Image (tube, helix red, strand yellow):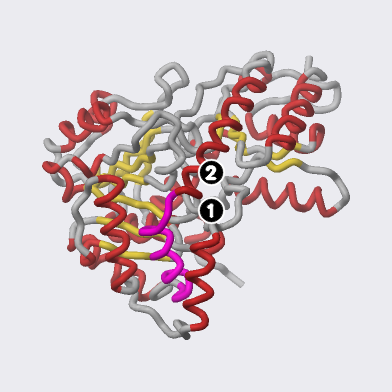
Amino acid sequence: MILSSLLNRFSEPETLKMAKLGRELRASGVDVIDLSLGEPDFDTPQHIKDAAIKAINDNWSHYTPVAGFADLREAVCTKLKRDNNLDYKPENIITSTGAKQSLANAILALVDEDDEVIIPTPYWVTYSELVKIARGKVVEIRSTVEEKFKVSPAQVEAAITPRTKVFMFSSPCNPSGAVYSKDELEALANLFKKYPGITILSDEIYEYINFEGKHESIAQFTDIKDQVVVINGLSKGFAMTGWRLGYTASNVDIAKAMEKLQGQFTSGTCSITQKAAVAALVGDLKPSIAMTEEFTRRRTKTLELVNAMPGFKCFAPEGAFYVFPDVSSYYGKSDGTQTIANAADFSMYLLNTAHVSSVMGDAFGEPNCVRFSFANNMSNIEKAWARIREALAKLQ
């Protein structure tokens, strides 16, 4: 059997691969603490579950419009106005089976073979692979811990060529936790005004998990609003990872293109999820705020533990629920059996020795770093970092 060459263009997500390895080790009887997956360890708030139960009882069990129910698209518009002061109409909104599909819709609607997509590092693992699926070319802009993992307009402009089609970034960022301020976004917006042919994909899935204050969207700047595709979803802020609901806000032409694509892939997302999503988007945000308050406490503890690790260089995340330390000081060290040559070796060493799962930074475009989640309870966080410290002490 000869499979499609498409499969050779992209890689399996390292986040999912590490989670799988951790599950396999746990199934063999090993007590593995998972600091790899980006999933809130909270249950979906009750008022959202109640809306889903009502939808089932009211027999919302049939096919849905590709772009989403009218009331859901209205709810997205209401949320964008309430939280972000962004004015969109339902015709600008496309809902999907998660922000990952929303990203795929946008990339496939915009990128042709050999088109260039500028992506600042570090970036979520799927960004680069979606570009490869579309036969586009990934153009990375390296950022550093010292720069707080953010890029300047000058760096972006230096990467722009006549083939540049898309600029893609996240704020708050997975994996670094970097958050762009309003002033920083305005500076980028002023740059993109000069390049109206470039579309900006703004991934805002971690919007509510922000430790610096109010979330800012680059779509707020009127001059470039039509160049922006806002990508968001319910997984992180509402603890709805398994429900699979993402959405985009964009100009009508891009929205129609994404709807056309989605019509051939999945059609509309789950009817019950959509009704629950309305309750999430326009309902009480207190559960989401409470989750962020708990993540804030875990962030404080995690940073305390990480900063006590010899040789780690760590940026304090401003959003999301990860730390992304530079661990390259351990490259070349050995416990007598295993030698750490790179971030992948480092992550595998921690999995097999400390029984703590993480994700190597290569997957995010930063080979000197490793991502650790603090979307786990405080007891497990403390236990995990104690194990990591003990494992690292064996490396000479």
326 or 171: nearer the eye? 171
* Residue that mark 2 sits on: 291
| Quadrant holding the C terminus | top right
Quadrant containing the N terminus in the rendered view: bottom right
Give SS at disc 2.
helix
| Residue range highlighted in magenta | 270-285
Toward the viewer: 48 or 73?
Answer: 48
Residue sitting nearer the eye, 257 or 60: 60
* Sequence-first tag of 1 and 2: 1
Q: What amino acid is labelled 2 in the image?
A: Met
Q: Tell me if 380 is positioned left or right of 135 in this view.
A: right
Q: Nearer the viewer, residue 143 or 65?
A: 65
Q: Is residue 209 above or below residue 261?
A: above
Note whether residue 112 is visible.
no
Q: Main secondary structure of the magenta part?
A: helix
| Quarter of the view holding residue 173 | top left
Query: What's the amino acid at mark 1?
Result: Ala
Figure check: 369 above or below 215: above
Give the residue at mark 1.
239
Q: Is residue 305 above or below residue 92?
A: above
Residue 368 on the magenta segment: no
Which corner quadrant of the image does residue 305 belong to? top right
Q: Name the residue at 31% across, 29% down.
A: 181
Which residue corresponds to the image point at 20% horizontal and 62% vertical from the top-left? 89
Q: Residue at x 17, y 47 (%)?
A: 225
Density class for disc 2 (Cα within 10 Å; few <14, some 14-19, many ≥20) is: some
Q: Nearer the viewer, mark 1 or mark 2?
A: 2
Q: Residue at x 49, y 38 (%)?
A: 320
* Residue 273 shown left or right of residue 80 in the figure: right
